[in-house]
Image (cartoon, helix red, strand yellow):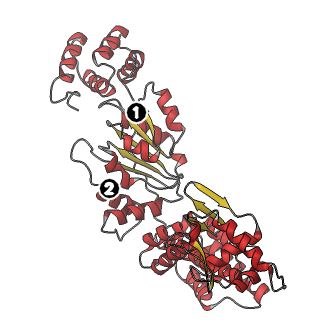
Amino acid sequence: MEFRVLGPVAVRRGERTEVLTGSLRRTLLGVLLARRGRPVPVDVLTDALWGERPDPRAPKKLQLHVHRLRAILDVPERLSFGTAGYRLEVRPGELDADRFEALAEAGIATARREPQRAVESLRAALALWQGNAFAEAEVPLLADWARRLAELRLTAIESLYQAELECGLHEAVIGELTGLARAHPLRERLHELLITALHRAGRQDEALEAYRRAHGVLAAELGLAPGPALRGLRHRVLSEPAPVASAVPAQLPADAGAITGRHAELAELDAAAPLSVVTGPAGAGKTALVVHWARQRRDRFPDGQLYADLRGYGEPAEPADVLAGFLRALGVTAIPAELEERAAAFRTLADRRRMLVLLDNAGSAEQVRPLLPAGSTCCTLVTSRDPLAGLVVRYGAHRIRLGRLPAPDAAGLLRELLGGDTEADTLAELAELCAGVPLALRVVAELVRHETPDRAEVIRRTLAAVTAPPRSVRPA
């Protein structure tokens, strides 16, 4: 059972949600919820519903509305009547406003001390907000409650951006803070946060212009100069050099070069699902494919490209260590100790950034899960020999299966690697004996290029080398 007042007033029971359309029903439920399980006298309810106009039928009308409200509750007896009035039982966690207040207050309290945790808490709180509570209410009890919730929301927004600035997301928040400062021009704290973000991003002229706009609005609307905090911030912008912006991470490995065929797979990658898994047998060219694609599409990810070899089939990389590397690359100096905290910090930093995360050679879905950014602005590519069904089921990952190259493409890859003077029959024979495995084809081409004896002898020795340790691709 859930009661919703942050937006349209509604009652959710199981899979069914009923939005209360009548103003009297909304007011009745709102007053009962505002009292949080305490009895509400009949005269208080009748005054809230019909004002102070005397109406001898008001108690009977109230009973009718109470009856209709009981009909949408999971247990009608939740709404009971006693000597002190009507009482609605509201259990912990059932009212969205209560959850909002708890999450918002927790985030506000920790915005400077534990910014990553604060961001998680504040974003969860603000996600509950679907609109102003009781937007049209004229009942003083509901209007006061709505004002308190609206003020808490603005404070939570300010604390959210404070925490994100502590996390180094100054560039990412400038656009949103600009809009908020325009929407709430009399809130000096929003102007402070915007000026701070611009200054930290090295945009001093824009920071000073934002101060001038704030000064002008406050003078015109209130006849006041900016407060001490805003004036002090202006002084810091003028006197302190802007911090040097941290470099955008660009961790992609070098492109392997020739990619023959794979047109369908490259087209699937171009579709840019937030999470894609490229799977296939060893030597199929998974890493070569995704690195080639990523380097060709770097302009899609202006906020950076992160790469990690998870070594899933050797000595697997620990997710905590991978996250520490990602956080350092994103400018974090104080790395949290626990895996969960590092994952939360990474999600915070990646949120709303247009960034590519390439997780190569994953051994399992469990190894990958802590490394996934949240939201849809990031693109995550995972390569693995395993189909990683857990990522498909839980996160809706798009799976791209990479098989062996068809014979014409395999011969074409050898031709590109060896040059155009190699006989077609030789290329076809080598391609067939290598079974279309790109890694085997590359090993063969490398050996052929560095041999000088008779070509037939080279082929014989090459194939023997490919199929015998230590160069064999079969154990891989």
Closer-to-camera residue (58/373) = 58
Q: Position of residue 353 (x, y in %)?
A: 52, 57
Other-residue count near label 1 (Cα within 10 Å), few / some / many at <14 / 14–19 / ≥20:
few
| Residue at x 22% of width, y 15% of height | 458
Indicate the quadrant containing the N terminus: top left, top right, bottom left or bottom right.
bottom right
User: Residues under labels 2 and 1: Cα distance?
Assistant: 27 Å
Assign a secondary structure to mark 1: loop
Left or right of residue 56, residue 330 in this image? left
Q: Position of residue 395 (x, y in %)?
A: 45, 47
Assign a secondary structure to mark 2: helix
| Residue at x 41% of width, y 34% of height | 289
The kind of residue tagged 1 is Gly
Q: Which residue is identified by label 1? A: 257
**100 in relation to 414, above or below:** below
Total marks shown come to 2
Q: Which residue is identified by label 2? A: 322
Other-residue count near label 2 (Cα within 10 Å), few / some / many at <14 / 14–19 / ≥20:
some
**Number of the front mark, 2 or 1:** 2
Q: Position of residue 82 (x, y in %)?
A: 60, 82
The kind of residue tagged 2 is Val
Closer-to-camera residue (175/374) = 374
Residue 9 shows in this picture: no
Left or right of residue 226, residue 245 in this image? left
Q: Quadrant of residue 408?
A: top left
**115 in relation to 234, above or below:** above
Residue 292 shows in this picture: yes
